[in-house]
Image (cartoon, rainbow, N blue to C red):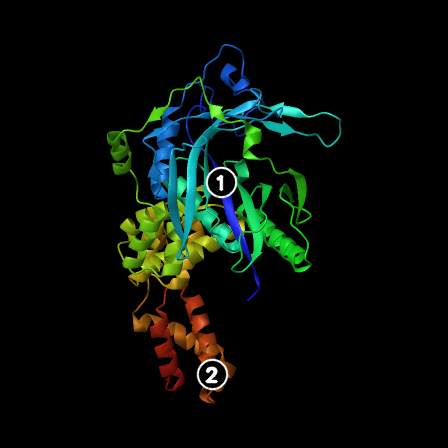
Amino acid sequence: MSDFEAVVGLEIHLHLKTRTKMFSPAPADYFGAEPNTHVHPVDLGLPGVLPVTNAKAVEYGIIFGLALNCKIASWTQFHRKSYFYPDMPKNYQISQYDLPIAEHGWLEVEGERIGIKRVHLEEDAGKSLHPDFGDYSLIDLNRAGSPLIEMVTEPDIRTPEQARVFLSHVRSIAQTLGISDANPEEGKMRADVNVSVRRRGEPLGTKVEIKNLNSFKSVQRALEYEIKRQTELLRLGRRVEQATLGWDEGGGKTYVMRLKEGESDYRYFPEPDLPPIVVSEEWLQRLRAAMPELPAQKFARYVASGVRPYDAEILAYNASLARFFDEALRAYGGEPQKLADWLNADVAGYLNERGLEIQDTRLTPEHLGRLVGLFVKGEITSRVAKNLLPEVMEGADPEQLVRERGLKVVVDAGAIRALVEKVVTANPAVVQQIKDGKLQAINALLGQVMKESKGTAKPEVVRQLLAEVIGVQLA
């Protein structure tokens, strides 16, 4: 074990799935839109305009806090956070400071509790674009004013892998609640990382913040690099300088962007154009009662039904996969682990080969449930089920395919014996190997019989008949 350990905290931004922006009626879904087409005078900070708080965004902040086991504020307000960048026309951001919507929560990841310091609401900035050739920049304000949740963890994370898993759990919660697409590729879930290294048992070391992390994999790689860099500095007796770092994805290393700002640099003060928000007990209870089953609860339910913990975690912490599994289970009606095996292995393999998500295919939960049901009930063989899967993924009805092609399992020994005798006659060399004691060679003949039967012969019956026809005793 190393003498040094990392101390990691995350700042996560989620773009909320509301119809309009945080404080203006402009459309909130800017992804793919022409630059500067989703803007409003409020977003531009024009004189005389007044912001209005998006009530749906506030509700999303509350239910997200509840899902993270947070204490929900009964009284909260917005503040102005002053900073001067071209992509923030007002020269300040409306955010929350000392009175966030939720705080003091936790999320369990792989048996460890990660503390949640705060969850607060704010508006996003616009986007600066820097052409490769030219001495100018472009500003797209479609994103300016978009509703965000920022959540800040306690410095409880210790490894890059744990940080990646934590992020995947947060994404799953947001998607399950329906408050955010939480898609890093579209900028709808972003993470900044605070990391320091210390000798075990000593006080916290000097913290740096890493920005420009556009995927969970980037977070893990950046942490691995930065932990190694800081550890080497400390081993040499040198000092780690507090700073804001960027992440060079191509180069695989961090770089200094600027010295770290202090809280006083932002000059927070209460937003004069917005009233405080009072969260009544009645409002809170109504939102709590409408909460869906969360990933941790799904995980517990799957395990209790007989699904292995490894498979249960894959399913429970992928919102679209969990919904698919639950619907398929109703059509299947059998042992849940069998269905989980197909979803996490065969279906996942098909998707990975093609770079697809399950929602990108025409596969329906009912069709997958019925396909697996046909196999589990012994009506079709494993080979037939696997051969049919690509067509079922494209929307075909498995029962119709089996019926039209005559693919039901053949258990009639008389019908199968003719195929067995044909294969045995055609392969005298293999038959002799089996008679000489190389019993495993019977699998070659078994495969040929299965091929002749188009996968419909029951393998156990084929194996037994092969032994009878060849005249050997199988163990």
Residue 229 percent coordinates (x, y): 65, 54
**Mark 2 Cα within 10 Å, few/some/many (few <14, many 20+)?**
many
Which residue is drawn at the image coordinates 50% and 27% (left, top)?
A: 268
Tag 2: amino acid: Val
Which residue occupies the extreme right position in the image?
Answer: 134
Query: How crowded is the residue under tag 1: few (<14 C-alpha within 10 Å), some, or many (20+)?
Result: some
Taking 20 as reference, is 205 above or below it? Answer: below
Residue 181 location (% of width, % of height):
45, 37
> Residue visible at 35% across and 78% down?
465
- Can you identify the residue that label 1 sits on? 12
Q: Secondary structure at mark 1?
A: strand
In the image, 31 versus 455, the foreground residue is 31
Q: Please name the residue shown 43% across and 53% down the image.
A: 347
Name the outermost residue toward the front.
203
The N terminus, quarter of image: bottom right
Residue in front for this viewpoint, 307 or 164: 164
Separation of disc 1 and disc 2 at Cα?
65 Å
Question: In this rendering, does residue 106 appear at all?
Answer: yes
In front here: 326 or 103? 103
- Given this view, does label 1 or label 2 mark the residue nearer the observer? 1
Disc assigned to residue 431:
2
Residue 215 pos. (x, y %): 55, 44
